[in-house]
Structure formats: C-alpha cells, structure tokens
C-alpha cells in the first residue's frame, strides 16, 4: 500500500478538550450471583431446582411503557449462575393467562411476540453492552449496544444457547452464554458488570425493566444495575474458523453467436474461509478469504433519472457485522446529506467501473463484481475506553473477455485495477463517558498499469481523515458534537478533470466564479464537517440544531459516500413527546423542522420547513402525517454543467395509518401529494403493506406501491448550436409501481424458508420539449423556450421508456449446528425494456415482463464452524 505522509499529516487536527465532571447518585440495583458448586444446568427450558436453588430470585420489575413507573401487568423474575466458561441465566416470565402467550416464530433477530432480554455491560464502561433476547418461541436475537444505547447493532451474531417452555405459571427461558462472546477485564479478581433485564409483554405491548429509569432520562447503559459475585474467571480467547464450499449454476438465454452464452448455462464451484480470532480479550480479528455472498438479497429495482448516484444498503454479512465502529457519518438528518460517510462498504467488491465500447459483432463476458481476495477486520474496546476498528481489503484486477464473432478472436480488457482499501477508526471515552473524542483515516490505492490507459479516469490514490468530539452536559441531557474531515485525491489530469466535472461539483459551470476549474491539476483537496448542539434522550421536549458543510473540492467516494459537495446546510428541529397515555391516545409526537442551504459562493440555494405528528391510540392503531414547504431554489446541478438556474418552490402533505401490530392481520397505508409552484410539477404516491400471520410460523407480506408524477423540467441532453450550449428539457409523465411479496416460514428457529418477489414497472412519456434561454428569469415560463426547430432530435418521443424488471429469490437457511450453515438459494430475474413506448399499462406490462425468459441462479452453500 502506498502512503502519502504529507497527506496524512494534513488530515490530523487537534481539538481542545473541555470536560465537566458529572455524577449519577441514583442507587443501583444489585444482583449477587455465585459459582456453580455442582453439575451445570442442562439447557432445556425447564427449572432444575437442585441447581438453580443455589441463588435467589430477583424481580420487582417496573413498567417503562406505556405507564412510566407503574407496576407491570405481569411479574418477571430471574436467576444467574456461572462457572469457568459460561454464564447461565434463568428467566421466569409469569403470565396469569398462559394460553394467550404470543409465540411467533421468525428468523434470528426477529424480535416478535413475547420476549425477555438480557443486557450485559461486561466492560463496565457504562456506554457499551451486549444484548441477548429470548423469545418465547425460542428465537434468538442479539445486538451490540454502543453510544450509551443510541446504537443497537443487530448484525452482531454471537454463539449462545437458548431453550424455552410454557407451563401453567407462564413461560421460562434458560440461557447459556459462553464467556468467549463477552469482553471483560483480565485484571480483577471479582468482576462487576452492568446488568439490565427487560421484558416485552406482547398482548399489552408493554415494556418493563429490572433496573428502572424514567423516560425523561437520557441514555441507556449508564442506568443499568450491577451484577456482583463473579470471581476468578479468565477471559477466553475466541477462535472460530468457518470454511465454506459453494456450487452454483446460472441459466440464461442461449446465444449461438456468443461463445460466452452458447450453452445457455454456466457452472462454477467455489470455496473460501471465514474466521474470527480473539487477538486479546479486548480485540477480535475477523477475516475472510475469497468470500461469497450469493445468499444475499438483490438490491431493489429503480430507474434513476437524476445526475446523482443511488445509495444502496449494505447486506453482506462480513461488512455489516460491527459496522458501527467503522462508521463516520458526517451529519445526521433524513436527507441526502445524512448518507455522507467516510466509509461506504459497497465500494469494496463493487461492479467494475470501465465499460468497453463494443461493436455489433462483439460480445463481452464481464465480471459482475470485483473479486475480494481477502479482508481483515480488527475491532475491539479496551477497559479504559479506547475503541478501535480497522478494515484492510485487497480486491483483484478484473478483466472482461471480448469476443469478436467475425474474426473469432477473443481479447482481454482490464475493467477494474488491483485496489487496496484501508479504513481505521478510533474513539476514546473520557470524563466518566461525558467526553468522547475520535478520529478516522481511510485510503484507497489503485495500481493501474501503463498499458491500461483507458483506466486513467480513476483516481490512483485517495485519502480521507476526520476527527470528532462529543461533549455531554447536565447528566447527558444536552450535547455538543463537532466533526471535521478532509480529503485528498491524486491521479493524472484526466482523473482530476473527471472529478471536477462530475455531478458532485460541476466546476465547469460558466457562472462558477468562486472555484477555479483547472484541467492541469493532478490532485484535489477538500474538507467537510458538522457542528451540532441539542437536547437529547427521552425527555418530553427535545431540540437540535446543526450546520454541516462540504467544500467544493471535498471527495470521499473512493471508499466512502458523498452525494454532492459545494454545500452548506443548516437545520433546526424541535419535538415534543407525550409519553404518558391521555384521552384516547397512548402516545404522541409533534415535530417542527426548519432548513436552509447555501453554496460556497454564498448563494442561498434553498430554504423550507416542515411540521409533522405521529400518534398511537389506546387501541394500538396509529396515525401520522405532515406537510412540507420548500421555497424557490437555485440549482447548481440541474443543467449538468451549465449555469445555475432558478426553480420553483413546492409544498406537499402526507398521511399514514397503521393497524394494531399485535394482530394476525396488519395493515399499513400511506399516501401523499406534492405540488410545484407555478404549475411546474405534481406528484402523488400511494402505498399499502398487508401482513398476515395465519399461524405463528408463517408470515405473508404484500407491499405494493404506486406513484404518478408530472415534471415540466426533466433534463434530456445538452446540444451545441452556433457555438453555444443549449440545455434541453421536456415534460415527463412518469408512473412507477412495484408489487413486492414476501413469505417467511420458520419450521424451527434454526430452519427457515424465505421467498421474495418484486415485479417493478416504470414508464416515462416525454412531451413539450424546451431549452433554457434565461435561467435566472423571475417567472418560471420565462426561463425556457419551446421553439425547437433548430434541433434535428425528436425529444418528445426519442426518450420515452418502459422499464420492467422482476427480481426474486428463495432461500432455505439451516443452522444445523451453532454457527454452521447450509443455504439453498434460487434467484430468477427478468428484465424487459422498451424505448419506443412510454405508456403504462399494468396488465400489458406484466404480460410482457413475465413473457421474457429469466436468468436464474441456483446455488448450494455449506459452511462448518470449528471453534475452541
């Protein structure tokens, strides 16, 4: 890996640290456990009195919701034992009507039906914890808790045992947790751990806690009670090795002239190794060699008509497990800025970025994704509050095979260079966890050969770095957050010119007088950051305000995600929560938002506001809605390299309704409508989710959506006429629908079948073509002309489209022993595209879609876990 040390020094910044001592004097609940003096309990969901009578029951839970501080509807009690290697927990969930206990089955991390939950702060840092949730049906759910309960990571999947049973007093959960799955000090004779036990009483949708704290108090882990009595245990080094083998067959339409598809199928056999090694008690090394993610569900279908990249969620297990520790989200909020992060793991193993120009007689055998040769991930936290996360990955040089059916010759063209990715994140807790400082560094290094000049549009080296500070005040009710990141990219002049001209910047804009567009540059620097203050937690009145920015030269997309740069964004939000039931309401939230934005030329690009509310009634139905107003804007990107243009403002409303989620039949419906000022646009959308559970083991979901929109200003092209650029737009009427269906059948908690299918149709019909004449005119209709006789293009018909796609998969997952898995996967996919017809007809479109021959993949993947 190549390191530019001047760049790294540039990325380091010093932040003065101001701390304020804060004390929490509330008396803690304490549970005293003892070491097992005889045979360990058999985990069977039954109470062996001879063993469990060694310790006392603890109960006296307190209701948290809906009646904060009240007695719970049902009693709960628990016991805890331990030996050299395991922690044993017995929970008795009393129920006066055991025949009404809800025992819904699901895959792991389903959190459905009645459950009890154990939270263990074995670091005893009052900030992080491990959560083990046991549902009455025997489904295990687990989460890694961080940031004092602000983050719950469901991707953490430890190995532990659970059995449950139902009797005439309620239900029982018996749990066995290996010490290898916990992290604790090696320097204490007697351990003191944070402990919380929670219960969900599903019939009443009621939550109760052993270590109670009110809804008005912020935080989570710091309110835990304490577990005493664990003595003379040693941390256990975790060693897990999981080799796998995968057999795959892909079926596709046979093409006689294409040697890559002349058989109509392709078969392959692959193998690799995943592993987890406890380097020390505090740090764990995860690794993967030649990973396969064939069991991962495909991304949803879409038609993106914007100039910006779509953001898709990470679904690959290696990258989502523990991802919070390597995340550096620059700003929060429910908008495009909230996606910006120094690390976006979808960059690793991405689709190759170069697309060769093919003649009519040429065919390409193209790799779908870049091969990950190997990846290492080191994560952990020391007893004095230092968190570390490092990911090191190497992806292969990828080549496409190009076959010429006339000459019968095949050549190879590099479509992605050999690339190394490094991500490193550290955070340190100080001042009784009231001060948190941190930093992050990423590097991307591409090794482009001299004979691969067609890849010169790629950056050769890219570095980002950031520092962050969070300071809490007044028992963590108030906070201040500061983040500052810098970026540096290198490449030849083609690569840096490409970055300057990208949709994230458009330096070439003719009215861009505050940034220099320079085609001779071989590097580019930038910075970004956020300053945020607010009142957080569960208090009734909360508020937050922040300013975030991205300088024009800031770039993080080599291994991070950046929607666009050259932006300053200000937000104020306040919300009021009714946490106690009143009148017909169980709870209610009312929120107000205000925002505005500028570019680095001090031009006000947008402003707006929002008010919304959500309420749940005492019958457990809920209703929500809101309205937005956006003032007129100045867009620096709409003309895609042209000058800034004024655009009309807009306003909208939306409403949603959800039925009682405790019932077998659940319905969620939403609708909304937006209007552009000056009749510039209009959009309506409708959605309904219907979820039905005929039996506890089966869940059927039907999730259709439908939207129709009209926009007078959809960008089509930039044409040159008499030496001037003319920016061509047209009116588009677009109709989009998807009819997603999911079926989840849990034979047992460890043997499940999932079916997913999503027909998708999007049709766009263009009319009323126009070109921009005066982008700064006061009136919308004075900014363009519909006189198009100067162009030979028929923009009213040549850009119509009707895109249809069906994506589906069927997955059988069997965890035949803890951590060892068998997958059977079938994934049929169909795509049909018509560029001569922009009309929408659901019946015709579905007939055309399902009349196409599918490409399908069938695979078998088997892994076996070896452990110490």
Image (cartoon, rainbow, N blue to C red):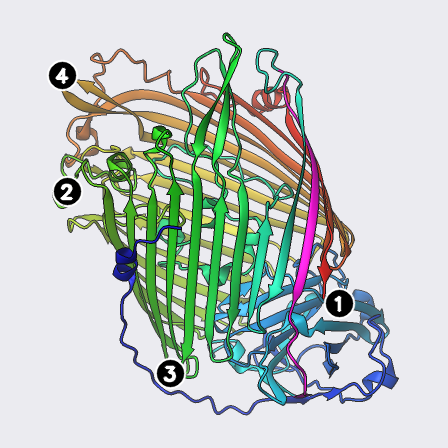
Foreground disc of the pair 4, 3: 4
Hey, which residue is sitting farthest front in the picture?
450
Q: Is any atom of residue 584 visible in this view?
A: no
Disc ID at residue 516? 2
614 above or below 714? below
Q: Which of marks 3 and 1 is nearer the N terminus?
A: 1
Q: Mark 3 highlights which residue?
A: 474
Asked if the residues shown at circle 4 and circle 1 are in contact, with their CB atoms under 8 angstroms apart, the answer is no
Please provide percent x and percent y for residue 782: 17, 29
Tell me the quarter of the image containing the C terminus: bottom right
**Range covered by the magenta-colored residues:** 229-254
130 above or below 562? below
Asked if the residues shown at circle 3 and circle 1 are in contact, with their CB atoms under 8 angstroms apart, the answer is no
Q: Mark 4 highlights which residue?
A: 722
Q: Which of marks 4 and 2 is nearer the N terminus?
A: 2
Nearest the camera: 616 or 634? Answer: 634
Q: Earlier in the sequence, mark 3 or mark 2?
A: 3
Seen at 57% across and 86% down, the residue is 187
- Mark 1: few, some, or many residues within 10 Å (few <14, many ≥20)? some
Nearest the camera: 827 or 202? Answer: 827
271 above or below 368? below
Separation of disc 3 and disc 1 at Cα? 40 Å
């Amino acid at each position: 890996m190549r390191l530019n040390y001047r760049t790294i020094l540039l990325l380091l910044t010093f932040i003065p640290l101001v701390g304020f001592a804060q004390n929490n004097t509330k008396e803690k609940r304490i549970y005293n456990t003892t070491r097992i003096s005889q045979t360990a309990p058999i985990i069977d969901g039954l109470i062996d009195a001879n063993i469990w009578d060694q310790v006392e029951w603890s109960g006296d839970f307190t209701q948290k919701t809906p009646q904060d501080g009240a007695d719970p509807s049902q009693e709960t009690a628990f016991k805890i034992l331990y030996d050299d290697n395991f922690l044993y927990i017995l929970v008795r969930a009393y129920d006066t009507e055991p025949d009404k206990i809800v025992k819904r089955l699901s895959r792991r991390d389903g959190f459905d039906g009645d459950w009890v939950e154990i939270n263990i702060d074995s670091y005893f840092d009052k900030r992080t914890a491990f959560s083990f949730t046991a549902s009455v049906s025997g489904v295990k759910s687990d989460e890694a808790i961080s940031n004092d309960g602000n983050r719950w990571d469901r991707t953490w999947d430890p190995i532990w045992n659970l059995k449950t049973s139902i009797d005439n007093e309620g239900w029982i959960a018996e749990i066995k947790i290996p010490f290898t799955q916990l992290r604790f000090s090696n320097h204490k004779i007697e351990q003191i751990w944070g402990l919380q036990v929670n219960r969900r009483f599903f019939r009443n949708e009621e939550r109760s806690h052993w270590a109670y704290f009110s809804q008005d108090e912020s935080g989570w882990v710091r309110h835990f009670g304490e577990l005493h009595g664990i003595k003379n245990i040693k941390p256990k080094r975790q060693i897990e090795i999981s080799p796998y083998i995968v057999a795959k067959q892909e079926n596709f339409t046979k093409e006689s002239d294409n040697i890559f598809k002349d058989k109509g199928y392709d078969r392959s056999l692959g193998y690799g190794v995943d592993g987890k090694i406890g380097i020390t008690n505090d740090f764990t090394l995860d690794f993967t060699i030649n990973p396969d993610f064939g069991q991962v569900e495909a991304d949803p279908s879409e038609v993106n008509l914007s100039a910006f990249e779509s953001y898709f969620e990470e679904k690959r297990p290696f990258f989502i497990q523990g991802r919070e520790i390597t995340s550096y989200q620059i700003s929060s909020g429910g908008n495009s800025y909230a996606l910006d992060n120094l690390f976006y793991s979808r960059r690793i193993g991405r689709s190759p970025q170069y697309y060769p120009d093919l003649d009519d007689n040429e065919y390409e055998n193209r790799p779908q994704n870049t091969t990950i040769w190997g990846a290492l991930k080191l994560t952990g936290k020391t007893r004095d509050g230092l968190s570390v996360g490092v990911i090191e990955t190497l992806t292969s040089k990828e080549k496409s095979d190009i076959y010429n059916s006339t000459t019968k010759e095949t050549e190879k063209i590099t479509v992605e260079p050999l690339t190394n990715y490094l991500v490193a994140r550290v955070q340190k807790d100080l001042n009784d966890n009231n001060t948190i400082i941190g930093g992050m560094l990423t590097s991307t290094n591409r090794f482009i050969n001299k004979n691969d000049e067609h890849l010169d549009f790629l950056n050769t080296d890219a570095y980002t770095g950031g520092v962050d500070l969070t300071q809490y005040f007044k028992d963590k009710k108030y906070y201040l957050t500061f983040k500052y990141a810098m970026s540096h990219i290198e490449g030849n002049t083609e690569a840096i010119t490409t970055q300057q001209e990208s949709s994230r910047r458009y330096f070439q804009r003719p009215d861009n007088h505050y940034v220099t567009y320079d085609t001779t540059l071989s590097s580019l620097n930038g910075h970004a950051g956020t300053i945020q203050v607010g009142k957080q937690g569960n208090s009734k009145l909360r508020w937050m305000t922040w300013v975030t920015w991205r300088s024009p030269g800031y770039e993080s997309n080599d291994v991070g995600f950046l929607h666009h740069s050259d932006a300053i964004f200000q937000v104020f939000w306040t919300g009021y929560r009714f946490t106690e039931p009143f009148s017909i309401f169980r709870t209610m939230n009312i929120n107000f938002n205000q925002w505005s934005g500028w570019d680095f030329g001090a031009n006000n690009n947008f402003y707006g506001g929002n008010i919304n509310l959500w309420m749940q009634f005492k019958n457990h139905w809920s209703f929500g809605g809101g309205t937005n107003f956006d003032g007129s804007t100045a867009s620096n990107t709409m003309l895609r390299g042209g000058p800034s243009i004024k655009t009309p403002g807009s306003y909208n409303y939306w409403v949603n309704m959800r039925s009682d989620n405790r019932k077998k039949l659940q319905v969620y419906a939403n609708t909304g409508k937006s209007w552009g000022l000056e009749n510039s646009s209009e959009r309506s959308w409708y959605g309904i989710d219907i979820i039905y559970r005929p039996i506890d083991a089966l869940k059927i979901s039907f999730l259709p959506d439908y939207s129709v929109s009209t926009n007078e200003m959809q960008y089509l092209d930039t044409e040159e006429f008499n030496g001037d650029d003319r920016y061509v737009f047209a009116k588009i009427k677009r109709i989009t629908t998807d009819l997603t269906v999911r079926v989840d059948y849990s034979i047992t908690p460890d043997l499940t079948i999932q079916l997913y299918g999503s027909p998708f149709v999007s049709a766009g019909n263009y009319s009323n073509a126009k070109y921009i004449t005066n982008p700064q005119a006061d009136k919308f209709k004075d900014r363009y002309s519909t006189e198009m006789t100067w162009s030979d293009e028929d923009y009213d018909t040549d850009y119509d489209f009707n895109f249809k796609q069906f994506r589906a998969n069927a997955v059988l997952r069997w965890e035949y022993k803890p951590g060892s898995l068998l997958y059977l996967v079938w994934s049929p996919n169909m795509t049909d595209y018509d560029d001569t017809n922009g009309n929408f007809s659901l019946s015709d479109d579905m007939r055309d879609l399902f009349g196409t021959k599918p490409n399908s993949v069938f695979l078998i993947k088997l892994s076996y876990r070896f452990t110490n």
